[in-house]
Image (tube, rainbow, N blue to C red):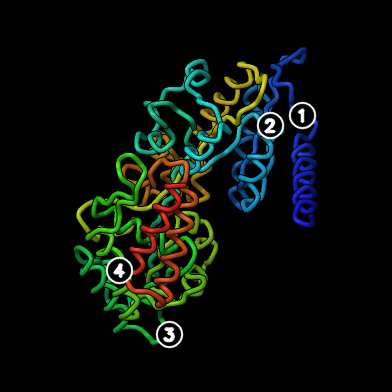
Amino acid sequence: MKSVTVFTLILVSTLLIVSGCSNGNEDSSGGGSGESGVTELSFWAPFSGGDADFMKSMISDFNEENDDVEVDYLTVTDDEYYTKFRTSVTSNQAPDVAIAHASRIAELQSANLIESIDGPAEEAGVDWDTYNENIVNSTMIDGAHYGVPLDTHALIMFANKTILDEAGVLNEEGMPEVGEGAEGFKDFLTQIQENTGEDVFPLSATSSGYSPLRIWWTLYSQMGGELLNEEGTKAAFNNEKGLEALSYMGDLMDEELWPKNIQDGGEIFQAGNAGIHINGVWMTGVLEQNDDLDFVALPIPNMYEEKATWGDSHSFVLPTKQDQSDEKREAAIMFSDWIAENAATWGKAGHVPSKPSVVESEEFQELEYRKDYAELTDYVSFTPSNENITAINDAIADQLSTFTSGQTNEEETLEMMEQEVNNILSE
């Protein structure tokens, strides 16, 4: 009885919040521009901090430039975002347009929470050839478009030039001199370990949560590994490549090149106590605020045969709304495409815009650090489109965190990962 009561209160509270979020500007009937001649759009995103500020700035520019469309923006906190997204759709109080991670699109589509955007995109004149093909593909299901990608945010490598100079691993251009392959990167870290102080971490990467998952996926993808079988019904990673990727991570920890139990690798790097830090591009905007830190931001080195790194994409989607007008759908996609076309500002947050023309623009190229890793748009490795991918990622992340804490070995970890993923897929 108690659980029912609590659930009811949470549901009612969420509905009230959702209702309040409409801010009086949302036309919940799904109508068009009406007598004012202005189509009003409600827009949700889980952005905070600098991301939210940059998005607000772009929306302000859009509203100023477009007299016939007015966008009202609401930030929903990241940890509640997809719960509120789902509730808003089921109560027919969804925003007209929203941000979703590309990795979530299959899950949202299978639950009928978002619509295909092919029709509105055609009416709005979206030219998909102006987008990076690799990123666009991450937002498609069975040949249909479900999102307008804004960016990719991927795993990259940050290097402290002061520490690397002390270790003697900078080349004549002042850039990290990393040897070839997995052994070359290990030797590079070993030189940092042997030629700097004992308080210096050769590599600082958070060793719990999603960080080990992203590192393992990067290494495994560089060997061409697949997460699931072709049908998406079985795990496909308990193999020689999956084991090699995991064993390499284990070797780095055993040799204390990547010390165990790092709770916040970014904090260590920001304090100037690590030679290398592996994290997402979003750290760029944080680190550049530290005037005492002399660093570079680069793609993850190639350890194996193929260029690849973990990544995801913030994409605009159309939440399912009863009686939504075609006029609003078209306006929402026109707005999404406009933001993507003017996303150089978004690059300040560290993300790489989805349109090559924006990456090549003078405004983006003038941003420090970003152009040095922008090439990764062509080889970002997205996790497969699968309606269970969030549960799968959570299960793998938990097992890898157990591994990086030293509680299981490589073989046991892979077997547990496989078992849990197959259980999820069989439900």
Q: Which of marks 2 and 4 is in front?
A: 4
Q: Are marks 1 and 4 in contact (CB under 8 Å)?
A: no
Whole-number angstrom distance, CA of label 1 to CA of label 4? 55 Å
Q: Mark 2 — residue? A: 42
Label 4: how many residues lie within 10 Å, few (<14), some (14-19) or many (20+)? some
Name which residue type carries label 2: Ser
Amino acid type, mark 4: Glu
**Which badge, 1 or 4, is on the more N-terminal residue?**
1
Q: In this view, does 1 lie above or below 159?
A: above
Secondary structure type for disc 3: loop
Specify which label sits upstream in the sequence, 1 or 3.
1
Q: Mark 1 points at which residue?
A: 25
Q: Is residue 274 left or right of residue 335?
A: left
Relative to 155, residue 64 above or below: above
Q: How far apart are marks 2 and 4 (CA)?
A: 49 Å
The circle drawn on residue 411 is 4
Q: Which of 124 and 80 is in front in this view?
A: 80
Which element is circle 2 on? strand
Is residue 123 found left or right of 247 in the rendered image?
Answer: right
How much space separates mark 1 and mark 3, taking CA atoms? 55 Å
Look at 40% across and 38% down and name the residue there: 138
- Of badges 1 and 3, the one in the foreground is 1
Disc 3 designates what residue?
Answer: 199
Q: Which amino acid does label 3 sit on?
A: Asp
The mark lying in front, picked from 3 and 2, is 2
